[in-house]
Structures are given as C-alpha cells and as structure tokens.
Amino acid sequence: MSRYRVAVQVVPRRGLLDPQGKAVADALHTLGFGGVAAVHVGRHLVLDVDAADEDTARRQTREMCERLLANPVTEDYEIAEVTPS
Amino acid sequence: MKFGIVTFPGSNCDYDTFQAVVETLGEEAVMLWHKDHDLQGSDVVILPGGFSYGDYLRPGAIARFSPIMQEVVQHAERGGPVIGICNGFQIACEAGLLPGALLRNASLKFVCAPIHLHVESNDTWFTSRYERGRSIVLPIAHGDGRYSADDETLDRLEGEGQIVFRYAPSALEAEEAYNPNGSMRDIAGIVNGAGNVLGMMPHPERAVDALLGSADGLPLFESILQRVAV
C-alpha cells in the first residue's frame, strides 16, 4: 500500500451557461487582457489516497468523481496528476 | 395523514414547513433527523429548504448520502410521495429522484422575492387543487436555482407533462425579466415519471396564509392530502 496525491479538476460542461466564468472573463477584459476568449471556473481537489498502485488510485478517484465529486449532468472532470506522496 | 419533514444540518425551512402542515393544514407531522433510519410511518416526506451541509461541493451533494435519504429513496421507489422544496429539490436531483440539476443563478445573485408562476399541469398529485393555467405568486429564496438538463430530458419532461410550474411574466413586468435564475425553459418545478416526486424552487410553505403575503401555496398541500387520503 502506498500513498498517492491525486489532483482532480472539475469544470462546468462546455456549452452550458457558465455565468461565473463569463464574469471573470469580463473582468479580465476590463483589465486589458483582451486576448482572453473564455474562462471556465471549476474546482480543484487534492486527495491523498492509499492504494496498492497508481492505477488503483486512479481508478478509485474516477469512481469518486462519478459518484460524488462531479455532477454527471452538468460537470466534466479530469484527473490532472497522480504522484507518490 | 402523517407528513415527515427531514432536518439536515443547515436546513432552515423545516419549521416553516411544520407550521404549514400542522397549524394551517391541521395534519400530523414528525421531524425526521438526517441520521435517522426510520421514516416513522410518514405518508408524505418533505425535503425542506435551507443549506444542507453548507452547500459544500454542490447544493445537495452531501445530503444525498445521509442515512435518512436511503429511506426516502426507498419510500419514493415504493411510490410514496416526496416533496423537495428549494434545497430539497436540489437534494432530490442529486439523489437521482428527479432528472437534471440546479446550477448557480445566471445573475450570480441570491434572489429573494415573490415571483409569478404558471401552473402548467393540474393533473399531478400535487396540483389537483389548482386551476390549470392559473397564475400564482410564491416566494423564492435561492442562489442556485437554474434548472439544467440535456435537450432530450427537457423534451421528455415537456412531452410527458412533468413540468408542473414555470416562471411566468406578470401583467406589469417586462417580458424578459420574469425568469429569476436563467432556468432552462423557465422551469420552476417538475415531477418524476411516476408522478410521486415533486421538486420545486419556490416555497409553497411560506405562502399558506394571506397574512404571509400569499396563500397560493396552500392548494399544493391540500392536493397531496386529498390524493393520499383517498
């Protein structure tokens, strides 16, 4: 059993109205960052997971995302990084 | 008839609902704690408004795993009536009792105001005492009420008559201003396919007496009472 640090990103599904992302994009435009085409605001979660190996940690995290961490109706998730910790 | 009203940590409309059921409707009600495993013989379960578990992660995401919710889901699967109001609607969606999800209001603002609704269907357990097409006024108080689902789900809700309440313009309002949260197809309340689970963002329990500003919520409770008493 080893401990892995798993980083997960959860973002609103593309195509759905994301008023928070739009508000941030508008603010960036006001600051002069005209090159920002779009912003999506989501959540970044960092989990410390004890598992037999990296694949198991990854698989368990995917299941956590499906069941709790992301809403399958409105959000997409991505396991950004798995590192031994 | 016995109503079971669930209290989660962070629920804040549980006692308003109790008052509406007991004082106004004159029925029996029991408060159900989120850690309970027993509905105590409730005929109708109400998931009240509030901010269960501080809305952590997403509104309703954590409450859905409460011990009492396992009982509520079984009750619903047996065909028992469940009413989810505001946060209760969010919890019912997260629990899979109703399709779709409730997202942050398009305005990003918490909206607390009386709003106009159109009763889309009175052919449900919860709206038989309303006149179809009637315009009613109920209060809303939420920051995450924008109903969202994919087109297929929305078409099915529409086709099967599962959309119960829609935000609607009043005579005095500008046409574009009536939808308070950007909800898809102006949806304010829906029922599941079997018709025994209702979810709605407006608060009928806060509108059961003219002294409260509106009594338009009362027929909802009378409808389910009539349905279950038969």
Image (tube, grey):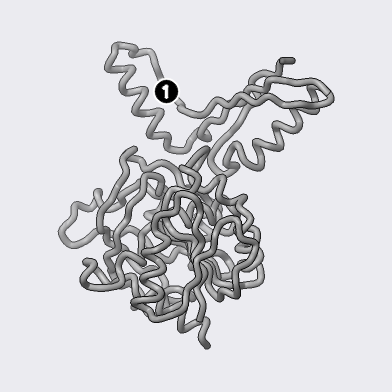
User: Which residue does the image show at 21% across and 66% down from the upper left?
Assistant: B213
Q: Amino acid at mark 1?
A: Ala
Q: Is residue A1 left or right of residue B122?
A: right
Residue B33 lies, in percent from the top left, at 54, 59
Mark 1 Cα-neighbour bin, 10 Å: few <14, some 14–19, many ≥20: few
Residue B16 seen in this snapshot: yes
Question: Residue at the spot x=45%, y=49% of the render?
Answer: B10
Q: Where is B127 relative to B84, above or below?
A: below
Residue B72 at x, y = what percent? 60, 63
Q: How many marks?
A: 1
Residue B226 on image: x %, y %: 46, 84
In the depicted structure, whether residue A43 falls above or below residue B126: above
Location of residue B203 (image quadrant): bottom left
Q: Residue at x 58, y 51 (%)?
A: B64
Where is residue B90 shown, x and y percent of the image? 49, 52
B82 and B98: which is toward the camera: B82
**Vertical comparison of B211 with B190: above or below:** below
Q: Residue at x 54, y 64 (%)?
A: B32
For this rendering, which residue is in front, A33 or B110?
B110
Q: Chain of mark 1?
A: A
Residue B160 in view in this figure: no
Please say if B130 is above or below B205. below
Q: Residue furthest bottom?
A: B230
Q: Tell me the element at label 1.
A: loop
Q: Which residue is mark 1?
A: A38
